[in-house]
Amino acid sequence: MKNKIELITNEINDFKIEDVKALENFRIHFLGSKGIIKDLFSDLKAVPNEEKREVGQLLNGLRTVAEEKLAKYKEQLESSSSQENSIDLSRTSDDSNVGSRHPLMLVRSEIIEIFSRIGYTVSEGPEIEDDWHNFSALNFAPEHPARDMQDTFFIEKGENEMALRTHTSSVQVRVMENSTPPIRTISPGRVYRNEAISARAHCFFHQVEGLYIDKNVSFADLKQTLLYFAKELFGEKAQIRMRPSYFPFTEPSAEVDVSCSICNSKGCNVCKYTGWLEILGCGMVDPAVLEASGIDSKVYSGFAFGMGVERITQLKYKVNDLRLYSENDVRFLKQFTAGI
Ligand code: DAH
């Protein structure tokens, strides 16, 4: 009898209970009304009197081992199944706080993308610039009004004049100084002008400068490049027109308008009922600028263009107040999550 009790104890310990079904089998097998332990208790009658007490105690112990194992696994299985039930697979996911890319950065990336497809690299220059790169090498005469205090934030006046760059054209000078043609590059960056902040003007904004220098570059190349750009940015139907203009660093110079995509050129308040929107300035690089930057103007020619990122973003996303770009109002910024 004692041997039997020992064997059954081992059997209880070795019994694997992995699910509710096994738990029930365990209960029936060991503790059920027709189970092993019940049978053993019946057998107790046959045990000699002097051993009855001891064997009885062993049997009680055996029953406790089985009951404790049953209780332990019952609890475990119940708690894991309640965990399973607490996962609601039909629930929508948490509205996690994904950030958004700034609209100016979305447009900047798009411009870079478009030009990189036709072989333009990206070059950058410093925001704190000397007089040479921002003005002199670009053919600005010493008394040119753009050098005026009213436009430029000067950091240091006099011999080592330093200022916050007023345009990214300064980068074209740096690129020409440091490389040999052919050059095909765009220079995105932040620029500064001393202007009162309003819906239409800001003291800092962003530009993308473009520069193409090689042998035999013509105005037709410029026009075709800009038409390609306008179509990529505003859609296949986009048209451009060029109006003669003046910049010290290009000759001839032009301002470029794109057909108004908001009203399909029918006329609206954004294009002021003209059907056209001004998007950039451009021209053939003035030979004096090529020479100042160390490029032989008898061998090489090229074109340059410069555009305002805020302006293009305004047209693409119909933003009507420049201040929105720098106020960090999440209600504005959140509208651009689609670009992620
Ligand atoms: N730098 C000019 C500006 O800030 C824009 C510009 C016009 C750049 C004509 C050019 C260009 O490269 O050819 O208004």
Image: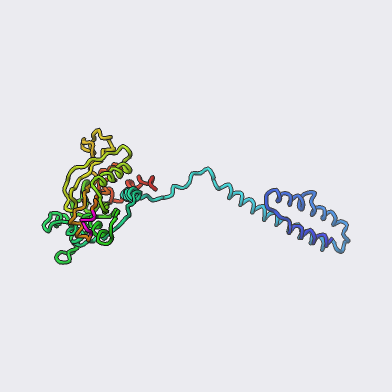
Q: Quadrant of the N terminus?
A: bottom right
**Above or below for 277 versus 82:** above
Q: Give me the residue at 86% from left, 56% from top.
A: 45
- x%, y% of residue 167? 22, 54
Q: Quadrant of residue 180?
A: bottom left
Considering every residue shown, the one lying at the far left of the view is 143
Residue 96 in the image: x percent, y percent? 43, 49
> Which residue appears farthest toward the top when viewing the image?
266
Q: Which residues are magenta?
A: 295-300
The part of the image, by quadrant, that contains residue 165 is bottom left
Q: Is most of the magenta stretch helix, strand or loop? A: loop
- Residue at 70% from the left image edge and 56% from the top image edge: 69
**Does 238 sit above or below residue 250?**
above
Residue 102 x, y percent position in the rendering: 33, 50
Residue 76 rendering spot, x and y as whole percentages: 64, 54
Q: Is residue 232 magenta?
A: no
Q: Nearer the viewer, residue 167 or 11?
A: 167
Nearest to the observer: residue 240 or residue 196: 240
Q: Is residue 337 left or right of residue 309?
A: right
Of the pair 24 and 109, the residue shown nearer to us: 109
